[in-house]
Amino acid sequence: MKNTQRNFVDHIIPHRIPKQKGVGKAPVNIALSKYWGKRNVDLNLPTNSSLSISLPGLGTETQIEWIENQSDQIYLNETKMAFDSSFAQRIRIFLDLFRPSPKGGFIVNTVNSVPTAAGLASSASGYAALVLALNDCFQWGLPLKRLSLLARLGSGSASRSLYEGFALWHKGQLDNGMDSYAEKIDQAWPELCIGLLEIDISTKPISSTKGMQNTVNHCELYQAWPDKAEADLQKIHRAIQDKNFQQLGQTAENNALAMHATMIATWPPILYWQPESVAAMHKIWQLRNDGCNVYFTMDAGPNLKLLFLKQDATVIQTHFPSIKIIQPFPQ
Ligand code: DP6
């Protein structure tokens, strides 16, 4: 465990005395304006701000309990994870920041309603739910902005999963990372739909953590990314306020493709797409040429997330029979 992380946590939490079993529940989120690259790896500080939408009903539910004289036990979807599995290791390192003593352990039960590590951001909902469960277990009573700071340490995109609806993660200016948190954008858009198009749900070949680090270090195009990302975020924020769907869709799709362009231009190259991903992109562009207002975004994986309005849901479902359509806002 890094001292910088422990000091950071010390500034946020009031104590390390567990009071009860804790529970937490958080949604997955899809970035419309992406986070790609860290300016500080230890504190998980991003090079650019990002903006997301949460998907209610898809996410993680976590229970946590502190037990004296016992080591950590981590369960994922009711299966005990091997001590040296990468999933358990990453969680244990995170939990080190909160341990009341070296002698006990946490029992963590985490249930995902999304495929783990399939580019559907289960680490985002996972660390957000874990932080909420810790807040409950230790009875800290921390506000969501403070919990967002803690979730960020687990996974950057988790900072945005504390909220329903739209969330904006401010990259922050401070070296100590205390101003790099997400907050809710208080704007509902009931007509907005997200379509999840699963191309391949097996574990991705390179994690987003490693992928973005390689891009930052080995891509000459990357220097253009932070300014573009900030400009896109402003456009998307305005599109949300104006309910300008075309502006939202166009900017989100272009932002995702620009992020993937930096990955592809990295050496060695990082390409998350499968042939079926590219075929789906062509199909979306064709539909758009035919007058259907549909756009897509993609994360560190081969799957596509389609953006469209409710009035086009039937057409989309017909062209993509396997798509899962989510309405992120109350109807
Ligand atoms: C492409 O939040 O998974 O989904 O902070 O290293 O855990 P770490 O990375 P992570 O990266 C998410 C990258 C992305 C874009 C986004 O969600 O903004």
Image (cartoon, rainbow, N blue to C red):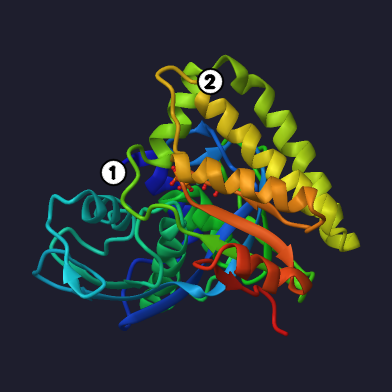
Q: Amino acid at mark 2?
A: Ala
Q: Quadrant of residue 2?
A: top left
Q: Split into 4 quadrants, where in the image is the C terminus? A: bottom right
Label 1 environment density (alpha carbons within 10 Å; few <14, some 14–19, many ≥20): few
* Residue at (66, 50) in percent of width and height: 284
Residue 153 lies, in percent from the top left, at 44, 49
| Front label number (2 vs 1) | 2
Question: Which of marks 1 and 2 precedes in the sequence?
Answer: 1
| Extreme residue toward the left, this view | 69
* Residue nearest the observer in this picture, 139 or 167: 167
Residue 265's place in the image compared with 20, above or below, is: above
Residue 118 lies, in percent from the top left, at 39, 53
Task: Name the residue that disc number 1 marks.
Answer: 1
Q: Amino acid at mark 1?
A: Met
**Badge number at residue 258:** none
Cα–Cα span, label 2 and label 1: 33 Å
* Residue at (29, 56) in percent of width and height: 91
Q: Quadrant of residue 160?
A: bottom right
Disc 1 residue lies near ligand 1 with CB under 8 A: no
Relative horizontal placement of residue 307, taking residue 203 as reference (left or right): right
Task: Name the residue that disc number 2 marks.
Answer: 265
* Residue at (48, 41) in percent of width and height: 44
Mark 1 and mark 2 in contact (Cβ < 8 Å)? Answer: no
Is residue 143 something one can see in this rendering? no
Residue 325's place in the image compared with 81, above or below, is: below
Q: Split into 4 quadrants, where in the image is the N terminus? A: top left
* Residue nearest the observer in this picture, 295 or 238: 295
Dot 1 falls on a residue whose secondary structure is loop
Relative horizontal placement of residue 35, taking residue 186 as reference (left or right): left
Residue 145's place in the image compared with 35, above or below, is: below
Label 2 environment density (alpha carbons within 10 Å; few <14, some 14–19, many ≥20): some
